[in-house]
Image: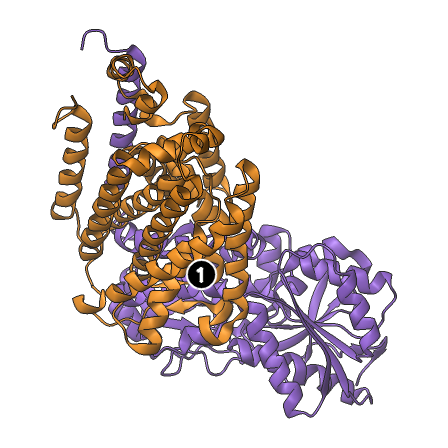
Chain colours: A purple, B orange
Amino acid sequence: MMSAPLDRRRAVGVMLAAGAAVFASFLQPAHAADDVVVGVIQPLSGPNAQFGIGAQRGTELAAEMINAAGGIKSLGGAKIKLVAADVPTPNTAAATTQRLISQNGVSAVVGAFVSSTTLAASEVTERAGIPLVTFAFADQITGRGYQYVFQVSPKGTVFGAAQFDYATGIAKAAGEKIDKIAILYEDTAYGTAQAKGLRDAAKKAGVEIVLDEAYPLGITDVSPLVNKLRASGAQMAFPVSYLNDSLLIIRALRQQQIDIPVIGGAAGYIIPDFKKGLGDYAEGVLSVAAASGDLIPDLAAKYKEKYGAFITHEALIHAAALDAVAQAMEKAKSSDPQKVRDALASLDYCAGFARGVPGGCIKFDANGLNASAFPVMVQWRGEEPVTVYPPKAAKQVPIWRGKPVN
Amino acid sequence: MRQLFSPGRVVLLLFFVAAAVLPLVVDPRGHLLRVAAMVLLFAAMAQSWNIVGGLANQISLGHAAFFGLGAYTSTLLFLKLGVSPWIGMFAGAVVAGVAAALLSIPTFRLKGHYFALATLAFAEVMRVIANSWAGLTGGPVGLSIPFMGTQPAYFAFRAVSSYYWAILGLLVFVCIVFQLLARGAIGYRLRAVRENENAAEVAGVDTFRVKLTASIISAGLTAMCGTVFAQFTFFFDPDSIFSLAGISVRMAMIAIVGGLGTLGGPIIGALFLIPLEEVANAYLSSKAAGLSQLVFGLILIAAILIQPRGIMAFWPKKRRAARAARSSVAPAQAAAKGA
């Protein structure tokens, strides 16, 4: 073997070194013993990154505030240490969640915004007996009888129904009777689930759906959709979209001067990028939301100060989720996942970020759903959306076709 | 004559022995074992792809279609009819084989990029169907494998190590099939197709039939990997199981980075890429959004620039050259076999 080519020996050496480095990296100590570790899984890259980053900031702020206030007091002031992981797709969720559990020894996992990713992660946490607290709102998440998954916000179909009921409620208050509506939705899990809620609510109310169109998430030309909408004679449009598609739809509507009220389905309609992308076209757009910063002005101001943008509902709800986990540890006097889970199941928490969840509390039912939470309707006013409906939560009156509704 | 215990075979055998005992020495519930299982699974997928992509150089970017068909067939058979996924795995292989045969009729007349694009489109079509035919597939929400504790008859285990050994078994099976095909008459015919399809046709090779056979076998094995993947990750949805970047391209990439058309290539490729991606994710994804993919992508580009023929090309050139010299008939074939 004297004459073996040098490049081969070098290559083998490099490969061995790389392999050793990989192996060694798995053996590193996970964390300091006195901290409590909570895993945060969010899509930090890929098409849902805007939402994931916002959500992660929410948990960061909540952890910072808890630590600044003395950590988990019943555990001798233990600090919360967050371990963040990127889960851009459901395929990566199982392995990543497993890593947080076995490498980092997390007491609980918060996150995953995207429903399908959360479903995938919950299959791992359920088997490992680790509580997962989430904002993702697919109905299946708490519909499987699982013991370790907790949903802070209402279910997807509830959102769809609220999107319809609230909008018709505002229209009625403004003296307009709604007979014809249009539904446009992106065709993945989120859009289809919420569209179903909308459709069922409209049928129940006896309102005719004159346009019911799915479109692919990566849509680049919405003019055929908008033309159909114009021709349909709908009095209101309900688009359920992520960000880019929401920008395209609203811009096309405004440019073609279609002035029918538009009621977005959360996600893309209520993040800072919506205003950035649309400027004045954003003004007056309504959307359903799981929470709104103006329900907790003090905490919302802290968030804005730290990150330079208003607190989105995904940031707020994930902050509330982390708050709930911390409260559960406080109550359980333990960071043992099983005890944290039991404490979460019997939690009744109405302070901190939980005040920002409409309903004001986090209290999970037997399925792990936060039963007291309800969606709100927000409307863009200048730089931020404000809560306008239902009246019990509203901070300002809604504006319908340019006129305030009292 | 070829030795029974050539260095290549010894290394491969050692690898499989090491792989088999790994669960005994690491934390059986740990993440390391899970990553190792993914390495073996992606090696098996890339090896399945290698049958068509490597031996015949028909670069398919749509193998996710077969992968997803396998996952959907076994999972739906289980959820709707209670059929064990072990049986569903073979049912999935049959479904994928039929799909491959149907797809072959129009696409095998296409060459190079056009073939790649056609296969890519096929996987996209499957994704759209799975998303829209909610009555059958559960639609965009995806399917969950119900949690049922340890039930070996239903391919359900608590311990990661049980899945790990099942995946290892699958990899060994796929490697044996690959080797039998590569060493058999069909392997020579496929390589003849790769070198020059017209010349092969003139020489009497029924090119259509040989490519058809290879793609049916390749699709069937890929579908079996799909079933195992579904059982192992407990959940999939149309966008992830029919994913272009996550499945189709990755299968091809692993085989290409490791060494196209070689037995060891997909294994080395998976050993290199999957842990690299995991480590990038584990250490960089909390630092800055998207940084882990950026680093992973850069390393990948570097790997391909340094050795475009794959990591297997670092294997001793001397022996290959010697064998090529011995084999006066077809040096190209010998070079391909050298690994």
**A47 or A370: nearer the viewer:** A47
The location of residue B306, given as percent across then percent down, is 42, 21
Horizontally, residue A224 falls left or right of residue B6, namely right
**B282 or A307: nearer the viewer:** B282
Name the kind of residue labelled 1 in the image. Answer: Thr
Horizontally, residue B247 falls left or right of residue A261, namely left
Residue under the point 34% across and 74% down: B79
Q: Residue furthest right?
A: A257
The location of residue A112, given as percent across then percent down, is 46, 60
When the figure is inspected, residue A276 is found, relative to residue A228, above or below; the finding is above
Residue under the point 57% across and 41% down: B114
Which quadrant would residue B152 be assigned to in this image?
Answer: bottom left
**Which residue position holds label 1?**
A117
**A329 or B231: nearer the viewer:** B231
When the figure is inspected, residue A7 is found, relative to residue A286, above or below; the finding is above
Q: Chain of mark 1?
A: A
The location of residue A219, given as percent across then percent down, is 67, 57
Count of labels shown? 1
When the figure is inspected, residue B115 is found, relative to residue A335, above or below; the finding is above
Q: Residue furthest top?
A: A3
The reply to whether residue A322 is in sight is no
Q: Pick the quarter of the image with the N terminus of chain B.
A: top left
Answer few, some or many: residues within 10 Å of disc 1's Cα (few below 14, many 20 plus, some between 14 and 19).
many
**B258 or B157: nearer the viewer:** B258
Which quadrant would residue B7 be assigned to in this image?
Answer: top left
Q: Pick the quarter of the image with the C terminus of chain B.
A: top left
